[in-house]
Amino acid sequence: MSTIKTFQAVNPANGKLLDGIFANTSSEEIDAVLKNATKAFETYRKKDSTEIANFLDAIADEIINLGDALLERCHQETALPLARLQGERGRTVNQLKLFATTVREGSWVDARIDTAIADRLPLPKPDIRQMLIPIGPVAVFGASNFPLAFSVAGGDTASALAAGCPVVVKAHPAHPGTSQMIASAIAKAIEITKMPKGVFSLIQGNTNEVGAALVQHPDIKAVGFTGSFKGGKALFDLANARPEPIPVFAEMGSTNPVFILPNILEQKATTIATGLANSITLNGGQFCTTPGLTFIQKSSVATAFTADLAKAIEAIPATTMLTEGINKAFHDKINSTTQSQKIQFIAKGQESTSPNQATAQLLRTTAVEFLAEVSLEEENFGPSNIIIEATSKLETLDAANSLKGHLTATVFGTDADFKEYSDLLAILEKKVGRIILNGYPTGVEVCPSIVHGGPFPATTALQSTSVGTNAIKRFARPICFQDYPENLLPKALKNNNPLGIWRLKNGTFTK
């Protein structure tokens, strides 16, 4: 591994080093952590639903008990506004409590029972029962843009712990102090609820070697990741190159295309433009659901819409980005994109002389050029958007058909638009995990029905979601018990249903 032993967090607003020296976790230390996690798994996987739910609730309570000191440190490490961080802390706590409720209710294990038919001909039917069980220690990588909700105690950790899996979190190097504080809250919750100590561990590091060593460790059984395509694909490749390949649930970004159909454009162009500008630039465009592409059909109304959107973008102040590297990558991508004569620069937001600032950018090209230049579909993490002008419905549909996988797609339209463009909606069902009508993609509601995922390259596992209660199923696997006597069956599969959960029994859902 790297000879670099320690590092410090940097305040992105001024470039100054923050208090606290953090050590890169060694391979030997990772091995010790995983031995503890594997040992803890044997105890933790047998905990009943109430014990695990109480543990999740205790983590939520201890995060709140950290008080404003957590928000202040997080603000220093990310430059995100305190109000935003307060809201994110609430989301983090609510996620934990949502999974606690899910575990207490218990039906997530998807119990299925097919009872025996001894006199069936020509052969008797055996008694077969199935449920989900935890898969083992899970590696979670903290995200840069959600230092609380997609980090140490974020959705991946909460869902893995809820499933009955120990978790080892690789803290994001941009906010190691925040990560350490959250880890201390989890440690306290472990003590309060008497969970095995190895059920959670935090490792630190600002090198790729630390993360690679974690993913390649034979005791890790799955990976949760939120970040760039480059980072997620690298972990995916490492996991699949192991002697025992493991699943990687990587959410790797998206350009979240927006389609504005002709009738709605005539009726609400200015209103949509204002809302879209806010969505593009919210928190510096540093959301995985930030809209990066806008498709419209060329017309005088479309020209007016573009002017309205440009005016709104020009009023947006520059934003301090999460890290110097993210800021540089954003501007490098803008510079390379605008070098093409086929891409028109339309507008930019207000500039700033302060360190690490990103200025909002609005570009434009045609549907023909979009189809010819595949790089235009790639995410540019930050406050930018490319308007794609089509000359007809057919060009719009061709552009939609060319899209790769994304987290979201948004369609603005009237009832008449949706009727006329029903084929567009059908195309988008194959391209994304969530379709929004007459709204904006930024903002992900944490609820049982949400899907935060999508086809590759948005994620490495298009059948999964990283938000909502279905996220728990990423870290579980089905097991089947055939002709087991009642006394050996898990509670979820016993005849009298002692857990009182919904089960599929002989083809019918029942309690």
Image: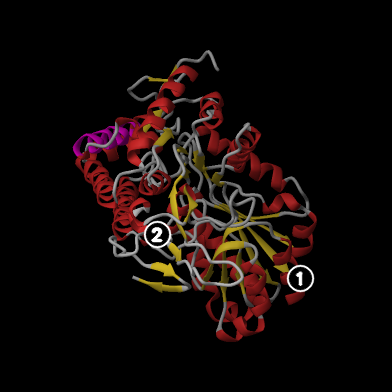
Q: Name which residue lies at 29% across and 52% down.
A: 49
Q: Would residue 133 be counted in the magenta stretch?
A: no
Check the image and report above or below for 80 versus 24. Answer: below
Circle 2 SS class: helix
**The label number, if any, that marks residue 395 in the structure image:** 1
Circle 1 SS class: helix
Check the image and report above or below for 20 versus 467. Answer: above
Local crowd size for mark 2, using a 10 Å CA cut-off: few (<14), some (14–19), many (≥20): some
Check the image and report above or below for 477 versus 503. Answer: above
Check the image and report above or below for 318 versus 396. Answer: above
User: Identity of the amino acid at label 2?
Assistant: Trp
Q: Name which residue lies at 40% across and 33% down.
A: 175
Q: Position of residue 376 (x, y in %)?
A: 70, 52
Looking at the rendering, in which quadrant would you find the N terminus? top right
Left-right relation of 191 to 508: left
User: Identity of the amino acid at label 1?
Assistant: Glu
User: Residue 475 versus residue 484: which sits nearer the camera?
Assistant: 484
Q: Position of residue 226 (x, y in %)?
A: 50, 44
| Occupied quadrant, residue 310 | bottom right
Q: Is residue 220 visible?
A: yes
Looking at the rendering, in which quadrant would you find the C terminus? bottom left
Q: Would residue 186 be counted in the magenta stretch?
A: yes
In the image, the segment drawn in magenta is: 178-192
Q: Which residue is mark 2?
A: 108
User: Residue 92 versus residue 349: which sits nearer the camera?
Assistant: 92
